[in-house]
Amino acid sequence: MTYEFSALGALLGLLFAIILIIKKVPPVYSLILGAFTGGLIGGGGLQATVDTMITGAQSMMSSVLRIMTSGILAGALIQTGSAEKIAETIVKRLGEKRALFAIAAASMILCAVGVFADIVVITVAPIALAIGNKGRLSCSSILLAMIGGCKAGNIISPNPNTIAAAEAFSLDLTALILKNVIPAIAALIVTVLLSGFLAKKARKQCADNASGQEDAVMGEDAAPRKNAVLGNDAVPKDSMTEPMTEHSAASSRSLPTFPAAISGPVVVILLLALRSLFGINIDPLLALPLGGLVSILATGQIRSTISCVEFGLSKVIGVSILLIGTGTIAGIIKASALQYDVIRLLDLLHMPAFVLAPLSGILMAGAASSTTAGATIASQTFAPTLQAQGVPALSAAAMIHAGSTVLDSLPHGSFFHATGGAVGMSVKDRMKLIPYEACVGLTSTVTSVILFLL
């Protein structure tokens, strides 16, 4: 058993990176500086630290290439209006009576076919807010439905986190996606239940406020006022101004038909499934961009190909650069005594080794407030250890991946602010959703662990 850096050094480096991220230093630089600091404190020396960081970054290159090409699919789905059409169709088919389920299901499906979670929320938000206004649903219930749907879809998608986890364990991407289908369904069910609970809670609060106002104005004109007592958590029309304006602008163009909109994702699914069905291996590096091109052709947007590609590239550049930074600190942690010390700690606590998989996903994603960074660091660091302890690679990757959705939307990450801004929610109200989001991620994680134990 040999290692170049101490566990304390690796932990202090990770802690330093977290502090820098919280202080709004760009995450990629935070992770690189954290890796460098951890290596020096860990006793590896300047040259060993730099070499290990470079090696860690190099190990990310295959994932980065696949993620870069996945941008073509994401760009095509958004720019051609396919994502909006898919969401709109699902919501209309399920109807307003099942509004929260429709919103969650639409978010889940869009994320599952390759659209990034923050873009899913921004895309679905105008439609969701319009339905929420008619059904008098609270902003919290609507946003939780979208975020929970994204968490469910994320663990069964060809998104960066899935690609990174599959790469670390040398797994077929389709196999990892299929492994978490049941946990994803469980997460969707809990999402609908929790968002329904928030909606009922907001209605009760509004009713109590209305009753209080009527008592206070008994000497005045106490005629019922439909929107006067909605409360901070409701969806009054004025809170929808900005999202609805964006939606109206997007809807001024004609959207594609549903078959055309879904054609790209269907092609991707079929190409990735060829390995499982017929032993024909089509790498995601080819399948994802081909799906994007099919989407462009099917929607008749061939003249917009360059703009679709450019838009998709703009959305994956940040993730790709983040992965390079993630690789540097993952390299330091992987070359440290941390993984061995964690196993010894689990032995002392009489806990089975497989607990390391979901726990590492939860903690690493919470540290970076990112599903992708959490899944990548945990997978890169603990894949050899978990497999050496007899945990099957597919189960370990699935548990890490599910675990990385528990604490991935904390305030020091961009997803927290992007999703809150999509529905015009204050930071204070957005903070109140974190425990509910964690419950959704924990549901998929626990389900994934149960499936491993069965």
Image (tube, helix red, strand yellow):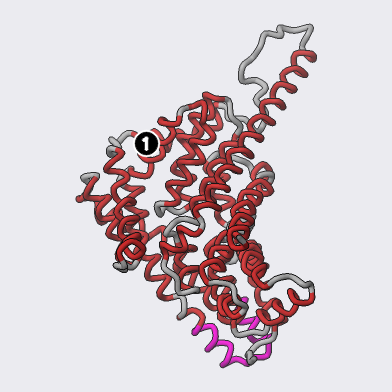
Q: Nearer the viewer, residue 53 or 189?
A: 189
Residue 445 image-quadrant placement: bottom right
Which residue is found at the position 50% from the left and 84% from the top? Answer: 54
Does residue 370 appear left or right of residue 309 in this picture? right
Residue farthest to the front? 454
Any magenta on residue 39? yes
> What residue sits 33% from the left and 61% below the top?
277
Range of magenta residues: 34-55
Would residue 426 be found to the left or right of residue 277 on screen?
A: right
The reply to whether residue 223 is in sight is yes
Three-letter code, disc 1: Ala
Quarter placement of the C terminus: bottom right
Residue 185 colored magenta?
no
| For residue 311, above or below residue 255 | below
Q: Position of residue 452 (x, y in %)?
A: 59, 63
Label 1 sits on a secondary structure element that is: helix
Residue 273 screen position, x and y as percent: 34, 59
- Residue at image position (72%, 27%) is 205
